[in-house]
Image (cartoon, grey):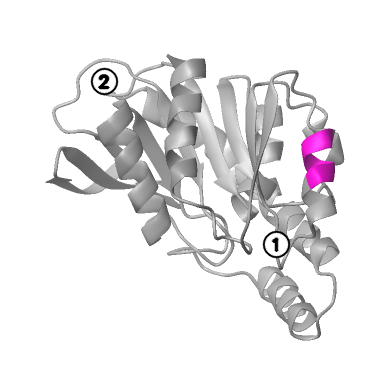
Amino acid sequence: MRFISRTSLDGVTQRLFTLGEVPGVLWTPEGADGPRPLILMGHGGGQHKTAPGVVARARRFVTEGGLAVVAVDAPDHGDRPKTEEFARIAAELRGGMAAGEDVTPRLAAMHAHLSRRAVPEWQEVLTAVQELDDVGAGPVGYWGMSMGCGLGIPFVAAEPRVRAAVLGLLGPHGLTESAARVTVPVRFLLQWDDDLVPRAEGLALFDALASADKTLHANPGRHGEIPEFETGGALRFFARHLG
């Protein structure tokens, strides 16, 4: 892990880093020392590790919960080069959306393409960050909506160090088998008027999760219009399950 920059603002230290070809960012309380819970934060499709929503949520987790938060650019996103295969899949997705088609199968194809690289990358990032003195090998949670959920479910299913997850804004296409292996506590968010993922698809993915401790939180609004109070709810959820 190679750190590129370090800045501190309002009690939060932000460090940009690279791990191999993966660019990332780590937020910790300023002056932090000793182990603490760590949240891995997956961004949505077309976004990146320092998208405004990611940064705002990460800073709140740090300032209000004393947590460490790490985000990385998913494959073919942010500062990473885009492959020809991803460009083709993305163009087909945009075309389907423009035509008013049900694009959930195309979303599933994109997420399957990305998760083959994203899952082992997240595992390497988790290992590297937990070796830092101000993070340590404490309990781990995952937060990811939409594409962050599509890449997060296979990761949570494969990674025993994750003890709780906040997921949502996605359907079950391509994720049923992985969802059946997710047994950690889950807080699942659904937008009742989602214009990208049909309501029934979100409910089906919630149902597919094997977690005995899972709750469904539905709010009015379109895809991505998650109310701010859900950030506070997620923070309390992680506090309960990660300590």
Q: Is residue 206 magenta?
A: yes
Q: Tell me: 86 left or right of 17.
A: right
Mark 2 highlights which residue? 133
Residue 216 appears at what percent x and percent y? 69, 36
Badge 1: few (under 14), some or many (20 or more) residues near its Cα, within 10 Å? some
Query: Which sits earlier in the primary sequence, circle 1 or circle 2?
Result: 2
- In three-dimensional space, the C-alpha distance between marks 1 and 2, rounded to whole angstroms, equals 44 Å
Residue at the image point whose x is 64% and y is 54% from the top? 146
Residue 175 visible from this viewpoint: no
Q: Where 234 sits versus 3, above or below?
A: above
Hey, what amino acid is under mark 1? Asp
Pick the residue in front: 156 or 199: 199
SS at circle 1: loop
Give the magenta range. Answer: 203-207
Q: Residue at x 48, y 63 (%)?
A: 80
User: Does 40 lie within the magenta span?
Assistant: no
Residue 116 in the image: state x and y as whole percent: 70, 47
Residue 55: x and y in percent read 35, 51
> Magenta-highlighted stretch: main secondary structure?
helix
